[in-house]
Image (cartoon, rainbow, N blue to C red):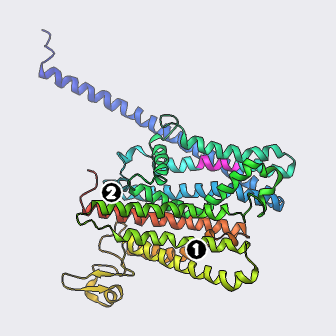
Amino acid sequence: MTKPDGDPRRAGTDRGVDRIFHRAAAPNAKARGGLGRARRRALDATLFFVLVACVARVAVSYASASDESRALTHLYYQAPCVVLAAAMGWGCNLLVWSRMKIEPHPLSVFELRDARVHMTHREVFRATLVAAAATAANLRCVLYTEEGDVDAAANAPALLYVSALVVLLMPARCGAHPHTRRFISSTLARCVSPTRTVTFGDFFVADVLCSMAKSVSDVERATCGLLTGGIVTGDVASNEGTCGGYDWKVPVALALPSTIRFAQCFRQYADSKNASETGEGDANKLWNALKYFSAFPVIFLSALKYHVSRDDWLGTYRPAWIAFAVANTAFSYYWDVTHDWDLSLFTTVDAGPKERLSGLQLAASRSRGRRAIFLRRELLYRKPRRYYFALASNAALRSVWTYKLSSHLRHDSELVFLFTIAEIVRRFQWSLFRVENEYLKLRRENALPK
């Protein structure tokens, strides 16, 4: 007699058959997964080979190019290269956080609905590799100027800049990584909106833009050159004229990221005042605004060099520029360590319920071994030497930060480019500890998403 469908013995038999089929299908699924990984690795290897070939060809062409062509190369391609370096820095941040395997993911501090749908470090590296290969190939077209192909040189930078805008601003449903692109475009829009509450992601992106201030000014000059046809004539490569390095628009562009951050600080102060029961705002927001304001004298005093006499520059404006540059660097470093990272290099730390010790007193006390000198009790990255390296390297890299803000120090394009890349390295080292501090703060407040 046929057993009914609800017979428990029949059900057990069906489950056994399902297990057999599952075991049989598992090797095939694993093989398909392995094949997919092999294809991705092959694609990555191909892209890397194309990038190396393009860079090698560009290096050869650059070595034999005229000074005018080199100036055009730096003007139009420094900003894209810095953006690529920033993408690599962000990918390195994601790699560190993925290796830590903590839940919730550190990206949760950006108030993302689901951090898992955003780009992983592998996807960021792969996208950067594709963009770098395309940029190197595009740069090769500009260097054709020496070989007589002026039209290609004129059209190549415009194609690169327009393509980047299309990829960033295309509808979220189109193209790859829609969630990440939507986050970037919406955050950039909020950065310039004075009516919206400033989130962690908003001021984080604005801080990254502050490190790319030199690139912002390069984009302004490059856009000016593309609109006026300067890339064909080479006029934009000189410092004179509408698109030149001496024009008033250069310091304005340099100051734009700091202006955005300056305005955000006042918005944060107003929001904290409205949220306070006593009606008092967070004074730290005003001090932070002062930090960004301190960059303005550095920028605009530097630009005065080309509009005043040599005696006035050396006797009055240059000493003032040096004083403001030192003040800005010192203030910024103090804020990095004390407020952004919450380390105790310049402040007192809790030694117990009855006493507070300075960092130096803490070092002299053998009974405080539970806390590393100059740090804090909670260390997400565990080993104190990582924090000490960050403190030292941040100080060293901060000392060259004003170089990229100063238009009168632009004569050595290669050195300026290296210092700009060094600032990007510093910024994404800073971001590791800034995100850590925010993560620990939210965890103490039980404000992290479950």
Residue depth check, mark 1 versus mark 2: number of the one nearer the observer: 1
- Above or below, 106 against 314 in this view is above
Residue 300, horizontal then vertical, whole percent? 62, 71
Q: Nearer the viewer, residue 28 or 442?
A: 442
Residue 374, horizontal then vertical, whole percent? 37, 80
Left or right of residue 325: residue 49: right
Residue 367, horizontal then vertical, whole percent? 25, 87
| Mark 1: secondary structure | helix
Location of the N terminus by quadrant is top left
Q: Nearer the viewer, residue 266 or 220?
A: 266
Which contiguous range is marked in magenta? Answer: 129-136
- Above or below, 25 against 268 in this view is above
| Mark 2: secondary structure | loop
Residue 134 in magenta stretch: yes
Question: What's the residue type where badge 1 is placed?
Answer: Pro
What's the mark number on residue 297? 1
Residue beneath disc 2: 102
